[in-house]
Image (spheres, rainbow, N blue to C red):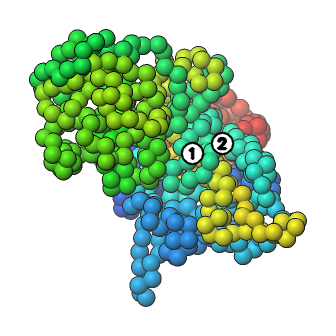
């Protein structure tokens, strides 16, 4: 490809809405242009990168025995009603109507469609196990599309679905996918960690997320991990062991005391001169439109996904002040945030964290402003709790649930996710096969996603410097750029052209920077775009030499043109 013809416009400025480095660099280097919120044009350079990632995914999926197909992007409501997700999938599901007023949605994933395909095509145990996958555009009407390709509304995902006769088979299929994922991300130049996670809107029994670990905001998930035993989990799934702490408030007498303006836990601690671990904290959430009262020891925080699961819901958010006011009025109270207690709110769903179990003679709010009860005890002063849950957000320094060593925390970008679905879709959608005895049995299913566009952005997050992108060779849009410094110099131009032609003949993806630009401009663009290798043909060609520069290391080798060609071919072959 000649640089003069390449469809690329580099920009001097970052887009105004770009907060993370991959969004900035992919925009500035001419890979993507925003069309509308969360929807991007993948320009030629980007498309080359995406196709490379897709092909790595394809090769590894195919070699693991999966078969590629392509399912429609538009999905009918009826299938979603069969699975029960039409009602419960939140606003992220982009719903629309056709000219006959038939309701449809744009596929955020394809469990329903693939289950439909399987129930028509997989009839006998003899056809199992079977794994089908596609690489297809997905649409999710994300609340906050941001970070460019990391969290778009329209994005490309590989989604695979496995069908097995029993759980043992599913375990095997899951393991095969886990191994394929490790290879896929490795080949894309990304080190990932598989972490246990919540199963979310997709549902099922067990799931692992493949995280690219980072320390920046581009990682939207917190990942807790143990260096000693390898335990790793998303914060929405981390179970930690707490250090010993004071849970007995020591208040021998139960009474109401004045605690003016103690609207926060800190103020209450100060007012009563107590640690937060002897205060019962009550927080009102809205789960699936209904108020839920979460109770936890006040030195700890509620993890919303855990709370949502404990309450059996699909959607969670903290209640607004207005909603709390309304709730109080309905129950004949007049308390504001900070003074909400469980007594008198027994009709709500109350979810208590495990930390509440050991509390004694503690401090609790009583739905009255500016006072608290001290010396409160479970069952006596607050409603009886049938069942305790883990709804607590883990914190760094708490202990590993497997080996007891301190947990660490870092941020992660989720590039892939694998789920054991079990019969979550096959049962309600009546997707069955006939077993050896001719009995109809629902499939044991698994599903496996990889964000193709997100993986590309994650690679930029991981591989860049102040000058631009440093593509891992296997997913770079082109491998080499050949840069003659002075396009008026015939020897330089001819040598550059001959190097370029030799590279093309050897199957190397090369660019010839034939533009009449200053050397500085050419170098800047080459670094910004992120070609892994650059061959520069300058004045030293009169001595028979050119320079080969490796973008990642900055290493420069001075070689004659033929040796530069063979050396770069060798380097590329090694790297892929
Ligand atoms: P997240 O928690 O980041 O919203 P998710 O867990 O809902 O993602 P999955 O349903 O597991 O996503 O989808 C599989 C993969 O698709 C993810 O691992 C991710 O790589 C990609 N993906 C999901 N949502 C987006 C998005 N909005 N933009 C880009 N890629 C996405
Ligand atoms: Mg996920």
Measure how far apart labels 1 and 2 are at the Cα level.
9 Å
Q: Residue at x 79, y 72 (%)?
A: 123
Left or right: residue 238 versus residue 161 is: left
Assess whether mark 2 and mark 1 are in contact (beta carbons under 8 angstroms). Answer: yes
From this view, report whether residue 153 is shown above or below residue 353. below
Mark 1, ligand 1, within 8 Å: the answer is yes
In the picture, which quadrant includes the N terminus? bottom right
* Quadrant into which the C terminus falls: top right
Question: Dot 2, how many residues are within 10 Å of its Cα: few (below 14), some (14-19), or many (20+)?
Answer: many
| Residue 362 appears left or right of 552 | left
Q: Nearer the viewer, residue 152 or 538?
A: 152
Q: Residue 509 appears at what percent x and percent y?
A: 67, 51
Q: State the residue lying farthest toward the front.
A: 380
Residue annotated with mark 1 = 415
Residue 68 in view here: no
So how many labels did they put on this image?
A: 2
Percent of width and height locating residue 299 = 35, 22
The residue positioned 13% from the left and 32% from the top of the image is: 369
Q: Which mark is residue 439?
A: none
| Residue 393 image position (x, y, % from top left) | 44, 31
Q: Residue at x 52, y 25 (%)?
A: 240
Q: Is residue 386 above or below residue 144?
A: above
Identify the residue at image location x=46%, y=34%. Answer: 388
Dot 1: within a 10 Å radius of its alpha carbon, few (fewer than 14), some, or many (20 or more) residues? many
Q: Which residue is denoted by mark 2 in the rendering?
A: 185
**Circle 2 SS class:** helix
């Amino acid at each position: 490809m000649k640089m003069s013809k390449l469809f690329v416009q580099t920009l001097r400025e970052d887009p105004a809405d770009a907060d993370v480095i991959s969004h900035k660099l992919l925009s500035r280097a001419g890979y993507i242009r925003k069309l509308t919120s969360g929807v991007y044009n993948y320009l030629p350079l980007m498309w080359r990168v995406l196709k490379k990632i897709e092909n790595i995914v394809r090769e590894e999926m195919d070699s693991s025995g999966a078969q590629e197909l392509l399912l429609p992007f538009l999905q009918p409501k009826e299938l979603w009603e069969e699975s029960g997700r039409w009602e419960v999938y939140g606003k992220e599901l982009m719903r629309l109507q056709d000219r006959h007023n038939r309701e449809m949605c744009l596929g955020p994933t394809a469990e329903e469609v693939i289950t439909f395909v399987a129930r028509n095509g997989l009839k006998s145990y003899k056809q199992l196990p079977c794994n089908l996958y596609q690489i297809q555009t997905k649409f999710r009407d994300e609340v906050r599309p941001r970070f460019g390709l990391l969290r778009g509304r329209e994005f490309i995902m590989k989604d695979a679905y496995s069908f097995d006769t029993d759980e043992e088979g599913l375990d095997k299929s899951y393991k095969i996918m886990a191994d394929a994922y490790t290879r896929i991300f490795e080949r894309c130049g990304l080190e990932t960690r598989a972490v246990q996670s919540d199963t979310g809107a997709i549902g099922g029994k067990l799931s692992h997320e493949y995280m690219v670990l980072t320390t920046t905001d581009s990682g939207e998930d917190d990942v807790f991990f143990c260096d000693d035993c390898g335990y790793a989990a998303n914060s929405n799934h981390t179970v930690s062991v707490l250090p010993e702490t004071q849970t007995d408030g020591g208040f021998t007498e139960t009474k109401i005391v004045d605690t003016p303006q103690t609207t926060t836990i800190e103020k209450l601690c100060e007012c009563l001169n107590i640690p937060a671990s002897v205060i019962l904290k009550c927080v009102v959430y809205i789960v699936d439109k209904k108020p839920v009262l979460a109770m936890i020891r006040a030195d700890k925080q509620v993890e919303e996904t855990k709370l949502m699961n404990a309450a059996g819901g699909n959607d969670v958010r903290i209640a607004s002040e207005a909603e709390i006011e309304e709730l109080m009025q309905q129950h004949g109270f007049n308390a504001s945030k900070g003074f909400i207690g469980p007594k008198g709110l027994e009709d709500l769903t109350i979810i208590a964290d495990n930390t509440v179990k050991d509390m004694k003679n503690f401090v609790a709010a009583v739905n009255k402003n500016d006072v608290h009860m001290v010396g409160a005890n479970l069952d006596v002063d607050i409603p009886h709790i049938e069942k305790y849950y883990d709804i607590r957000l883990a914190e760094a320094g708490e202990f590993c649930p497997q080996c007891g060593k301190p947990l660490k925390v870092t941020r992660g970008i989720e590039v892939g996710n694998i789920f054991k679905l079990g019969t979550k879709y096959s049962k309600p959608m009546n997707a069955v096969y006939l077993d050896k005895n001719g009995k109809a049995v629902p499939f044991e299913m698994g599903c496996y996603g990889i964000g193709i566009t997100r993986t590309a952005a994650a690679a930029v997050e991981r591989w860049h410097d102040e000058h631009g992108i440093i593509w891992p060779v296997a997913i770079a849009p082109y491998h080499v750029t050949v840069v003659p410094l002075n396009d008026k110099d015939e020897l330089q131009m001819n040598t550059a052209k001959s190097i370029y032609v030799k590279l093309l003949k050897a199957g190397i993806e090369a660019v010839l920077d034939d533009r009449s630009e200053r050397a500085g401009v050419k170098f800047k663009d080459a670094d910004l775009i992120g070609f892994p290798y650059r061959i520069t043909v300058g004045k030293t060609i009169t001595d028979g030499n050119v320079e080969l520069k490796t973008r990642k290391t900055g290493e420069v080798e001075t070689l004659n043109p033929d040796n530069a060609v063979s050396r770069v071919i060798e380097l590329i072959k090694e790297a892929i």
